[in-house]
Every structure is written in structure tokens, then in C-alpha cells.
Amino acid sequence: MEHNESSQGDFESTLKKHAVELVDSLEKGKFGDAVQLIHELNQTRDRGLYQEVGKLTRELHSAIVNFQIDPHMPQAEEVSQITDATERLSYVVKLTEAAANRTMDLVENATPLINSLSDEAQALSTDWGRFMRREVGAEEFRELARRVDGFLTRSSEDNRVVSSNLNDILLAQDYQDLTGQVIKRVTQLVTEVESNLLKLVLMASHVDRFAGIEHDREAMLAEKDPQKHLSQGEGPQIHADKREDVVSGQDDVDDLLSSLGF
Amino acid sequence: MKILIVDDFSTMRRIIKNLLRDLGFTNTAEADDGLTGLPMLQSGNFDFLVTDWNMPGMTGIDLLRAVRADERLKHLPVLMVTAEAKREQIIEAAQAGVNGYVVKPFTAQALKEKIEKIFERIG
């Protein structure tokens, strides 16, 4: 970077010096000298430009090399880190989806058991109340006793199933550990890529200065107008509690809607 | 009561389907975005629509607008269940004629309240 500053500085001081000399030679009528000065100016500029483009190319090359995969992996040559990161993230999506489905399977399996036990307990409780009030005859009591017996057996079996489902639901959360590790690695890669890209952008801006290129900033900003994407949806907001333009929960939504007359 | 659930994530459709079943609504159908959901609504005698916002193909807000623009569907109650949480977006949905708005992550209680409120208002 320091070298850059100095080559930029050299260029600018040469520019200033030659400009003064150029005006001087023109005023004195030394046109030959003037042409020579213009030629030298051009050469200085071209040299700087070549140097910057050279540096940019080298930096670009090393950035591309830096994107290469971890050398410990067997397919290191073919797979760039970006491809790897994409695959890692797909793996996260797959794991979380599988865990969600596994959890819902277990819940859907347990819910009818619990509901049916609860219904049966309620029915038995009603009849048991009648028995306590001596409203039940001998024949009906034998039937009631059979139902209580069946209920106790089924209750114990179903409880085992529900308890085992709860345990499996707990285990289904093990994806958190794996996905956490993967996401941390990808986050690290994104940070590295960002800093490499930033270096390239800085290099490119030096080339721009030497070459006198100016970019239409407004057009560039307009391309990523956030308004255009709003109705496409943005997905979850991360710092919802710190932002004024974002609701922080259902209560906020309800307040906003009721202020609109809902 | 026939309900259409539109969301691009099958797990979210399944969660909503389970919560609706818990509330006593067992007649549900699913679609993964507005493009598949709209024809189902047009031919299916649905009484209620629950939709996400951010989906590939046709988004939920566009689906809502299409429903309101359709002569036969324009009175269909629509509940939006979405992660979209910008005030502007909620206002946009309200202006497009949404009947309720639930932000993800949501609770079973919140979903229940909004659905009950919508049916109460419709009578």
C-alpha cells in the first residue's frame, strides 16, 4: 500500500513540476521543449498506469488463489471455497429441514395418544363419580373395572411411547451443534473474501486515478435501490429491536394495524 | 371450512397445518407459491387463505392483490404469516386488503387470536 501512495505521489509531483515548466517553455516560445515535456508527462502517466494495472493483476491472481480450498481436502483442486461454502450451507438447510420434519413426525405420532388417553380418563372419571355416589349396579361395575384395568395398561404403554418420542425430539436438536460449526466457518470465509475484495477495490481505484476514469455513482447506487426489492420480500430482519423502520414483534404489528384502523 | 396454506417451506406449511388442526380446521390444502396457489383458489371453493410473503414465482403480496382483483375471490379472508417485518411492508399489505398479519416467529396463541378475530369480524 505504501508503495502505491508513493508512486501516486511521484506522479502528482512530476505532473505539477512539468506543468510549471510547460507553461514556462510556452511563454518563452520553446515549442520543442514543450512537446518534449508533454511526451514525458505521458510517459510518467503510462508508467504509473502499467504499474497499477500490474499490481491489480497480481492482487487479483493472489485473491483467486486465496479463494482456493483448504489443501487437506482430496478434491482441493476442483472445488473452490465458495463452492464448498455453498455446499456447506445446503447441508445446513438439509439438516435443519430433516430435524424439523423428524420433530413434527414425533409430535404428530404422540398427539393422538395423549388426546385419546385424556378422553378416556375423562369418561372414566365421570363413571367413577357415579360409582362413588353408588349409582352403579354390579354388572356395570364389572364393566367399569374392566375399563379401568384396560386404561391403566394402555396408559402405561402409551406413556412409554410418548416419553420415548420426547427423548427423540431432544436428540433431533443435535443439528444445532453441527450447523453452528458449519455456519461459523462460512462466516469466516465471507469475512476473508470481503477483505480480499476490498483490497482489489482499493487497487482498482488507484488505476482509476491514473487513467482519469470517473464512475457514475448515482447510476451505480440506483441499481441497488432498496425500494425496488421491498415488495419481493426481504426475509427475517436481524436487528429488529434496534431499527425504527422494523416492527419488533406481534404486539408492534397489532399496534401499527390498529393505528391504521384495523 | 376449507383453508389454503401457501408457503415455500414445507416445514412451515406443516406447522401451520398442525396448528389449524388443533383449532379444529381439518380441511386444508397446500401450495408452495402464488403461481400454484392462485389457480387452486380459483377452482377450489376455499373459505380462507393463509399465505407467506417471500416466495419464488409469485410472492404473497402479489397473490393477495390477485385475489382482491378477482371478482369471485375478492371477499376471501386472507391472513399473512410472514417474516417480513418492515413497517412499510405491513402498511403495504394493509392497503392491499389483508385481513390479518402475523410475523414469524409466531406462537400458536397469536395465530389463534388472529384467525378468531378475522372470523368474528366476518360474522
Image (tube, coloured by chain):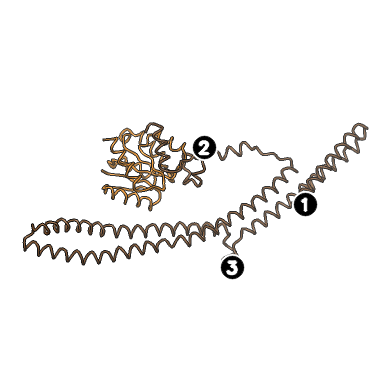
Q: Read off the residue under disc 2.
A: A227
**Pointer 3 local density, CA inside 10 Å: few below 14, some 14–19, many at least 20:** few
- Of all residues shown, which one is farthest toward the front? A133
Q: Position of residue B41 (x, y in %)?
A: 32, 41
Q: CA distance from mark 3 to mark 1?
A: 35 Å
Q: Residue at x 39, y 57 (%)?
A: A100
Location of residue A59 (image quadrant): bottom right
Chain A color in figure = brown
Q: Position of residue B73 (x, y in %)?
A: 32, 36
Q: The disc labelled 3 sits on which kind of residue?
A: His
The tag earlier along the polypeptide, 2 or 3, is 3
Q: Position of residue A62 (x, y in %)?
A: 67, 57
Q: Read off the residue under disc 1.
A: A3
Q: Read off the residue under disc 3.
A: A72
Q: Position of residue B79 (x, y in %)?
A: 35, 41
Q: The disc labelled 1 sits on which kind of residue?
A: His
Q: The disc labelled 2 sits on which kind of residue?
A: Gln
- Chain in orange, by letter, is B
Q: Chain of mark 2?
A: A
- Residue nearest the observer in this picture, A107 or A101: A107
- Left or right for A1, reference A88: right
